[in-house]
């Protein structure tokens, strides 16, 4: 594949997603999934000469104007820097950015709170909350302006084969794309990962997150609250003044029962469950539910293939780190690819992919496993678990290394 002879490519807007003909179906890299991580990865390759295709099952218009999906993503300062480098941060309206000045973790009816605050001399908040749809929208705007990136929307990937020589990806409209490297960014239940023969630990937790925005009379002071109560966990994420996002983690059948309530009944249930912490509340958005599934792929690479984002590691949302890790994973891979290109090596160079996999595993495994232990502790309600939670919070509060370590991780 000659890099010099490729004409500029733009998004494929044809209603059928376009059947690709001739040399148009040969790419250096095919990315499966135009979620926030797949799009970030394509944007990270903007400075390269590589010909990139991003395949997405959703339509062009739904990517250009993504609907609010309830998720408010808590971005670390490192993620904000990455989004700024990609040109996406400044595209997100200031009114959609809510600073996180601290977090408190509560256990049951105990008055004790484990506190996380930004270091007093840092001058930066712990992080910034941004709606997921705004991150996607901003990244999409960046990628569609890239000369050498092609967006193929409206068709899913239904087959993928790979070898040391390259990969072939088949779309649901029958189009076949060849690539030197295929990158799966198609969510935690990635079909491409399966097609590439990569297994994963998939943990369906039997719980779901029910999310909505509320307006409330008490001030939140930009402090997030994670409250582990009996049979439920409630997170309160501070948005604009007098507005928060509420995330209830419940057994799935209980979440769906609440989802079916009319607005008045739902609001009175919510007020009861929040025990007046935010004062009088009114609903400010539709409700959204997410069944909780965590995943860890057995490998993050295969010949001429790599996994990024949730396709590699699907974190539990309780630690608010899935996208942060995904953003860092795509950055590591893009850097490895550009270094390989500079050194005259292939974009699917096995040594480069091996290093990518090792680094990602080392950087993400501690948080992934610590989160799973935390979930185990907090999803059980017997006396021993409640006691362990109580002692755990006090231990963390009085061992600054633990607390500051977590704050630093959030701030990183
Ligand atoms: C309730 C909730 C709250 C969260 N809060 C946070 C937070 O505060 N901080 C944080 O860092 N993370 C958070 N996360 C995690 C974050 O949302 C994910 O890590 C992130 O969305 C992963 O992005 P992705 O691009 O890898 O995958 P996805 O967002 O799942 O995107 C995958 C894309 O691939 C497409 N696709 C799928 N299959 C195919 C196919 N066969 N062919 C073509 N296209 C396909 C999909 O349509 C989609 O567009 C939260 C998650 C949830 C559920």
Image (tube, rainbow, N blue to C red):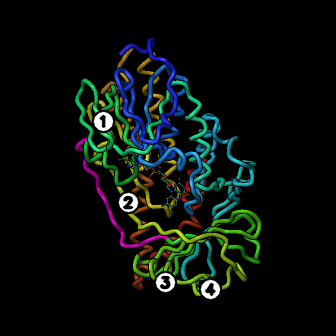
* Residue annotated with mark 4: 264
Q: Which mark is residue 294?
A: 2
Q: Please rate how many residues cluster around mark 1, counting C-alpha atoms within 10 Å: few if below 14, some from 14 to 19, many from 20.
A: many
Quadrant in the picture for residue 202: bottom left
Task: Give the left or right position of residue 407, taking residue 3 as reference.
Answer: right
Q: Residue at x 34, y 54 (%)?
A: 189
Corner quadrant of residue 89: top right
Residue 40 pos. (x, y %): 52, 39
Within 8 Å of ligand 1, the CB of disc 4? no
Q: Which residue is mark 1?
A: 169
Relative to the observer, which residue lies in front, 282 or 175? 175
Asked whether, in this view, residue 245 is left or right of residue 172, the answer is right
Residue topped by disc 3: 230
Q: Where is residue 283 drawn, in percent x and y?
A: 66, 76
Residue at x 22% of width, y 44% of height: 197
User: Badges 2 and 1: C-beta atoms under 8 Å apart?
Assistant: no
Q: Is residue 337 above or below residue 372?
A: above
393 in magenta? no
Q: CA distance from mark 2 to mark 3?
A: 22 Å
């Amino acid at each position: 594949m000659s890099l010099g002879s490729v004409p500029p490519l733009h998004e494929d807007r044809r209603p059928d997603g376009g059947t690709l003909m001739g040399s148009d179906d040969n790419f250096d890299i095919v990315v499966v999934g135009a979620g926030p991580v797949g799009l970030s990865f394509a944007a990270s390759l903007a400075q390269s000469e590589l010909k990139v295709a991003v395949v997405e099952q959703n339509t062009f218009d739904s990517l250009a104007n993504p609907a609010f999906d309830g998720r408010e993503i808590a971005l670390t300062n490192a993620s904000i820097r990455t989004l700024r480098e990609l040109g996406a941060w400044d595209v997100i309206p200031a009114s959609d950015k809510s600073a996180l000045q601290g977090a408190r973790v509560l256990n049951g009816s105990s008055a004790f709170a484990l506190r996380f605050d930004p270091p007093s001399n840092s001058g930066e908040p712990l992080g910034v909350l941004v709606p997921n749809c705004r991150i996607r929208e901003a990244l999409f705007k960046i990628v569609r302006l890239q000369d050498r990136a092609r967006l193929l929307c409206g068709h899913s990937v239904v087959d993928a084969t790979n070898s040391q020589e390259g990969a072939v990806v088949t779309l649901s409209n029958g189009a076949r794309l060849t690539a030197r490297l295929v990158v799966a960014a198609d969510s935690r239940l990635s079909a491409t990962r399966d097609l590439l023969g990569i297994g994963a630990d998939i943990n369906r937790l039997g719980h779901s997150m029910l999310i909505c925005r509320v307006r409330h009379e008490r001030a939140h002071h930009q402090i997030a609250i994670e409250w582990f109560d009996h049979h439920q966990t409630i997170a309160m994420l501070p948005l604009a003044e007098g507005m928060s996002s509420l995330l209830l983690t419940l057994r799935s059948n209980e979440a769906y029962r609440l989802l079916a309530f009319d607005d008045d009944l739902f609001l009175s249930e919510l007020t009861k469950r929040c025990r007046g912490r935010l004062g009088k509340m009114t609903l400010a958005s539709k409700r959204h539910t997410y069944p909780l599934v965590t995943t860890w792929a057995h490998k993050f690479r295969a010949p001429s293939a790599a996994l990024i984002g949730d396709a590699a590691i699907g974190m539990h949302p309780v630690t608010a780190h899935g996208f942060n890790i995904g953003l860092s994973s795509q950055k590591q891979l893009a850097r490895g690819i550009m270094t390989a290109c500079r050194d005259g090596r292939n974009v699917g160079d096995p040594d480069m992919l091996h290093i990518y996999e090792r680094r990602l595993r080392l950087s993400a495994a501690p948080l992934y496993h610590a989160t799973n232990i935390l979930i185990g502790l907090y999803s059980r309600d017997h006396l021993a678990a409640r006691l362990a939670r109580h002692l755990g919070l006090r231990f963390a509060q009085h061992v600054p290394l633990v607390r500051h370590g977590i704050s630093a991780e959030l701030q990183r």
